[in-house]
Image (cartoon, rainbow, N blue to C red):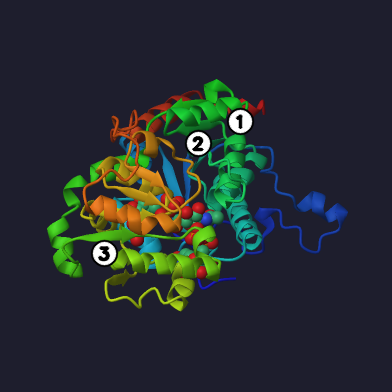
Amino acid sequence: MSSAPAPRSNTGGAADADGAATGRLEGAGPDERAETVSPAYGAAAGSGEVVHIVGARPNFVKAAPVVAALDARGVRQSVVHTGQHYDDRMSAVFFRELGLPRPDVDLGVGSGSHAEQTAALMTGLEQEFIARSPELVVVYGDVNSTLAAGVVAAKLHTPVAHVEAGLRSFDWSMPEEVNRRLTDQLSDLCFATSPEAVGHLAAEGVAVDRVHLVGNPMIDTLLGNLDRFDTAALRERLDLPDSYVAATLHRPANVDDPEVVARLVARLHEVADQIDVVMPVHPRGRAALTAAGLAEHPRMHLLEPLGYIDFVTLVRASAAVVTDSGGVQEETTILRVPCLTLRPNTERPITITHGSNRLVVDSELPGLVSKILAGESFGAGAIADVPPLWDGHAGERIAAVLADWLSGAPAGANRGA
Ligand code: UD1
Ligand code: UDP
């Protein structure tokens, strides 16, 4: 299905080689099916182990402080990498830099259409959960790996904790909105990063005792690494210009349609007429952006995706950021770097009310960059205090709730199982 590496396990195999442990149904008639379905269904014995599911770049940044905080409490845990992202620069570099333990298993699922990828994720995760019988599955954010793990765990009656619950763009055309809404409904524990997320969960009928406002683990990672963001060293190593705009784009709405891409490239070139633009290019948009001539401006500097430390250092030293990333809206909020978000909406409005973020359409980019460079207001909200609890301790709060929960752990308590 993809160029991703084949599945590998560090712990001795997720399922029997003949598939028996997975309840595989291929070729089985109705009677045989009853015999081959794993007894793990509905049993949910629970091994006492917390299993974290990560697969895509933003997951790693969010999981690192949670895994570390649970480790400090001596909680038994393992990390399952789905392999949704697999290039070294989209995956392994984060494990090296952020102190995440090497995944216990990499399912090697790789890329594909939504249905192909989600189906492969669910199949791989089901085998893994049956083999491990986790006490609790922890999922992060809003990527396909998040939803797949939530669905599979719920049907195995395995409790789920969702980190970064309750964010809403109210834009159902975004795959992330589908993923996060459904995951929240399936989760026994919802960890919210901001007060409005708590409100969304309440409005959708999520029981209040399932919801915990804990702050933002992505910001834990940022604050925990502040002394590693050496802007002078990065400038020298990457031969960066003195002043530049940092850009990232990967949303399907921005990089999948060649007409949209051509327009965005023209706008980025107008920005580059004023100031150098440094852009680590996400693999999703690489071909379309290249075909539209992105590199064909002397002040456009295109890079491979950067590791976390280099990327945040790049942002920290920039005059402004142009992005459609969720995480980057949050990071610029803390770093107080002007952020122009090329989207019609955001599931992170707190980055506008408490940060330096502004939603923009492409035609606004050159004018707003010019204002930022002139030191004028660019229309972001007045800078308020940083969002509540974005203080570097979200991972510890999550670990405290999980430890309490584990000490009393009734399996699937909130679903009445
Ligand atoms: C995914 C998430 C998105 C998140 C983003 C973070 C979903 C639906 N989308 O989007 O919410 O913001 O990750 O970066 O889960 N590719 C590579 N190498 C890799 C990974 C991907 O070349 O290591 C290329 C493949 O061509 C692939 C494409 O990128 O088809 C898209 O990858 P995919 O994981 O499906 O979605 P993203 O756009 O990365
Ligand atoms: N990031 C990175 N290198 C890059 C671009 C982004 O390390 O070249 C980091 C960024 O700091 C943030 C995370 O990746 O912490 C966000 O990932 P992404 O934008 O891919 O996903 P989103 O947040 O939009 O889901």
What's the residue type where badge 3 is placed?
Answer: Gln
What's the residue type where badge 2 is placed?
Answer: Ala
| Circle nearer the N terminus (3, 2) | 2
Q: Is mark 2 within 8 Å of ligand 2?
A: no
Residue 194 in the image: above or below residue 89 = above
Q: Is mark 3 within 8 Å of ligand 2?
A: no
Residue 375 in the image: above or below residue 270 = above
In this view, the residue in front, 92 or 412, is: 92
Percent x, y of residue 56: 46, 56
What's the residue type where badge 1 is placed?
Answer: Gly
Percent x, y of residue 51: 48, 44
Question: Which of the two discs, 3 and 1, sits closer to the camera?
Answer: 3
Which residue is tagged 1? Answer: 412
Residue 67 in the image: above or below residue 33 = above
Q: Which mark is residue 310?
A: none
Q: Is residue 312 visible?
A: no
**Structural distance between the alpha carbons of marks 1 and 2:** 18 Å
The residue positioned 18% from the left and 51% from the top of the image is 228
**Structural distance between the alpha carbons of marks 3 and 1:** 56 Å
The residue positioned 44% from the left and 58% from the top of the image is 362
Element class at badge 1: loop
Element class at badge 3: loop
Query: Which of the image's four quarters has the N terminus?
Result: bottom right
Give neighbour class at mark 2: few <14, some 14-19, many 20+ (Cα, 10 Å): many
The residue positioned 19% from the left and 60% from the top of the image is 243
Element class at badge 2: strand
Which residue is tagged 2? Answer: 165
Mark 3 and mark 2 in contact? Answer it, CB < 8 Å.
Answer: no
Which residue is tagged 3? Answer: 274
| Circle nearer the N terminus (1, 2) | 2
